[in-house]
Image (cartoon, rainbow, N blue to C red):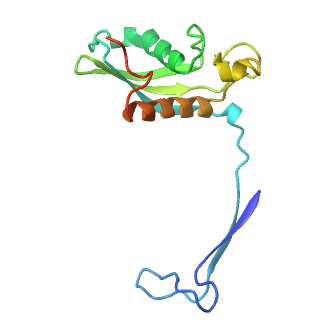
Amino acid sequence: KTFNVEIGKVGVDSLSNVFDANGNPIEHNIKFSKTFANINLDEASSSFTFVLEDIECSDDTVDALAGVVKGKIMTLLESDTSDTSRIVLTSMKCENGNTVITTTTLLPPSTDGGGRSLRTTSSSSAAVGTERLHSINLFTKLRDLSQEQHQGGSRLSNPK
């Protein structure tokens, strides 16, 4: 899909204008066309920093916690905790002995039917059947849960 953009003075009564670096008004409007990229979200991955607090760790043991971190992500996504093939953790580090920080990449669902599907079992999708979610949708779900937690508690907090 293509769209056109025009920047500058529109009509005689317009108070807006575009100026050059010296503050001089540009006489003609700037016009250009752009085309939206044809993006298939089922083929996209998403990377972000995941922080898991209230988990005992050290620099020597942080890599051994990869399974725990993946399990927590899967639990938050309400997915089968044994299916972690779409989650890649890199640069894991421990801070203050109780916080694990890692770069997390959610891979796209497998197109060959042989794994990497991260199927959700939530009640909203159960009525429609098992649903394959693309990585952007999964990231958005994690982001929303994080925002809920900052606004007053959610499933993100670890029970003591």
The x and y percentages for residue 86 are: 59, 19
Would residue 118 be visible to someone looking at this image?
no
Question: Can residue 133 be spotted in the picture?
Answer: yes
Q: On the picture, is 60 further left or further right than 151?
A: left
The percent position of residue 44, horizontal first and vertical second, equals 64, 34
Closer to the camera, 79 or 117? 79
Work out whether residue 24 or residue 70 is closer to the camera in this orientation and state it. Answer: 70
The quadrant in which the N terminus is found is bottom right
39 or 68, which lies in front?
68
Q: Is residue 152 left or right of residue 124?
A: left
Position of 114 with respect to 145 (left or right) is right
What is the quadrant of residue 56 in the picture? top left
x 54%, y 20%: residue: 87
Residue ID at (62%, 92%) = 12
Q: Residue at x 45, y 88 (%)?
A: 24
Instruction: Tell me residue 93's x, y (percent).
Output: 33, 21
Residue plotted at (51% across, 29% down): 142
User: In the image as oriented, which residue stretches furthest toward the bottom?
Assistant: 12
Please identify the quarter of the rendering in which residue 51 is found.
top left
> Quarter of the image containing the C terminus?
top left
Q: How many marks?
A: 0
